[in-house]
Image (cartoon, grey):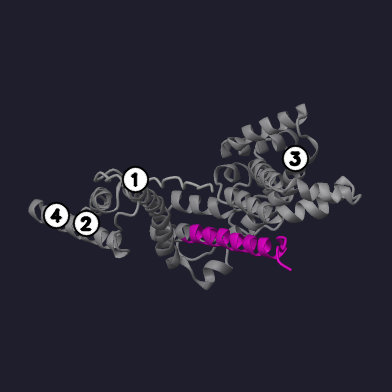
């Protein structure tokens, strides 16, 4: 009779004692959600108290800029130190970077809010029915309006858009769909990049010199201003449209080719509808880029006080040139001229805002629908 021996079961090794602080926990602690805001409020209040005491002691005004800068720096230091103690170094660095990004955003918003507030406060004073329904013909001193400047701005900008948008979109289509890797495409890309940095005054001089060759020196026409603005618009339209077309997946093109659709129809029916939202945004950005230009329009369209609906005959007034001339050529009373300048600036901002709202609406309506 054979006896089977069972192998001895090894004793379970006792667990090694874990040395304290041998591992770092990523969730050692957490500050409550209200802690950053509370710390920011306390820091701002403490710094404000110090600055107020210094202002009283030195008999000076309270420095809001210095208070904001010191409060931001103090908050960043305190939140980093407290978070490092409670939450660990990883979370402390995260909070520090978040605070720096937030401060940078607020700094970027300061001039935008300041400009918007200043223009609105000073421009509303000029708004009236007469301001929007009359021109400056035979007006000296108070009264008058900007109707001729609004009409001139809209007509010149519309003409520039009609010239620039087809040229820019067709150029972008060639660069993306037909000219990939070709020497001509590389040359066009280089020229577009160079045109992007052209000063606006150079565009105005180009348009003036072009028309002066055929019509003689001293000529001023609305269409000249449209040509000058189109020189500034075309590179913006090309670059933005090119980037949007490159974002269209190649699978969409290949699927259309597999079904036997020719290339031009694929571009028309597949590529452009897919990128229409981004292209529309780029076009609106180009219009916003040129609608406030003063120097090229001052050289090409000139200054006028009467209504002019014909781009090919006579001078035309525009809103930026109107604001410039009203501020630089102040009469009596001077406040009337300054109010009209601020009012023209506010109307120009409102037009740009309206164009951007229209662009968003167009992009939303014509963008491809992802859902069924």
In the rendered image, which quarter contains the C terminus?
Answer: bottom right
Mark 1 sits on what residue? 13
Q: CA distance from mark 2 to mark 1?
A: 55 Å
| Image coords of residue 180 (percent x, y) | 76, 34
Which residue is under mark 4?
A: 50
Q: Is 257 in front, or is 32?
A: 32
Which residue corresponds to the image point at 33% horizontal and 50% vertical from the top-left? Answer: 25
Q: Which tag, 2 or 4, sits closer to the chain's start?
A: 2
Residue 24: x %, y % from top left: 31, 46
| Label 4 Cα crowd, 10 Å radius (few <14 / some 14-19 / many 20+) | few
**For mark 3, what is the residue?**
176
Closer to the N terminus: mark 1 or mark 3?
1
Circle nearer the N terminus (1, 4): 1
- Tag 1 and tag 3, C-beta contact below 8 Å: no
Could you tell me how far apart the alpha carbons at marks 1 and 3 are, in whole angstroms?
68 Å
Q: Which residue is mark 2?
A: 43
Position of 200 with respect to 142 (left or right) is: right
Regarding residue 239, the answer to whether it shows in the image is: yes
Tell whether label 2 touches label 3 (CB within 8 Å).
Answer: no
Q: Is residue 349 above or below residue 249?
A: below
Tag in front: 4 or 3: 3
Residue farthest to the right? 260
Element marked by disc 3: helix
**Which residue is drawn at the image coordinates 70% and 58% (left, top)?**
309
- Residue 272 or 78: which is nearer the viewer? 78
Q: Position of residue 38 (x, y in %)?
A: 26, 63
Q: Nearer the viewer, mark 2 or mark 1?
A: 1
Which residues lie in the magenta part?
343-372
Measured in 3D between alpha carbons, the distance from the residue under mark 1 to the one under mark 4, in whole angstroms, is 64 Å
Alpha carbon of mark 2 to alpha carbon of mark 4: how far? 11 Å
Question: Earlier along the polypeptide chain: callout 4 or callout 3?
Answer: 4
């Amino acid at each position: 009779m054979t006896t089977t021996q069972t192998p001895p079961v090894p004793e379970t090794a006792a667990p090694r004692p874990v040395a304290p602080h041998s591992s770092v926990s990523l969730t050692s602690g957490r500050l409550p959600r209200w802690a950053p805001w509370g710390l920011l409020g306390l820091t701002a209040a403490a710094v404000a108290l110090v600055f107020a005491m210094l202002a009283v002691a030195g008999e000076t005004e309270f420095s809001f800029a210095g208070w904001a800068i010191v409060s931001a720096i103090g908050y960043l230091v305190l939140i980093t130190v407290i978070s490092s103690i409670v939450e660990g170094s990883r979370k402390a660095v995260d909070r520090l970077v978040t605070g720096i990004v937030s401060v940078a955003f607020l700094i970027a918003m300061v001039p935008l809010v300041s400009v918007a507030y200043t223009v609105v406060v000073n421009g509303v004073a000029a708004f009236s029915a007469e301001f929007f329904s009359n021109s400056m013909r035979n007006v000296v001193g108070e009264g008058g309006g900007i109707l001729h400047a609004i009409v001139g701005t809209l007509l010149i900008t519309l003409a520039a858009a009609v010239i620039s948008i087809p040229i820019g979109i067709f150029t972008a289509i060639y660069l993306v769909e037909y000219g990939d890797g070709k020497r001509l495409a590389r040359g066009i890309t280089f020229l577009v990049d160079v045109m992007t940095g052209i000063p606006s005054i150079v565009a105005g001089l180009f348009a003036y010199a072009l028309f002066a060759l055929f019509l003689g020196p001293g000529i001023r026409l609305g269409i000249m201003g449209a040509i000058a603005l189109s020189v500034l618009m075309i590179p913006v339209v090309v670059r933005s449209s090119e980037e949007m077309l490159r974002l269209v997946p190649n699978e969409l093109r290949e699927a259309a080719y597999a079904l036997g659709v020719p290339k031009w129809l694929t571009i028309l029916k597949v590529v452009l509808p897919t990128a229409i939202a981004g292209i529309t945004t780029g076009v609106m950005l180009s219009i916003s880029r040129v609608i406030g230009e003063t120097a090229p329009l001052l050289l090409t369209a000139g200054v006028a006080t009467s209504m002019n609906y014909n781009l090919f005959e006579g001078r035309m007034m525009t809103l930026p040139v109107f604001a410039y001339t009203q501020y630089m050529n102040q009469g009596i009373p001077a406040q009337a001229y300054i109010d009209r300048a601020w009012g023209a600036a506010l109307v120009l901002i409102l037009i740009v805002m309206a164009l951007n709202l229209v662009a968003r609406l167009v992009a939303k309506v014509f963008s491809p629908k992802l859902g069924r």
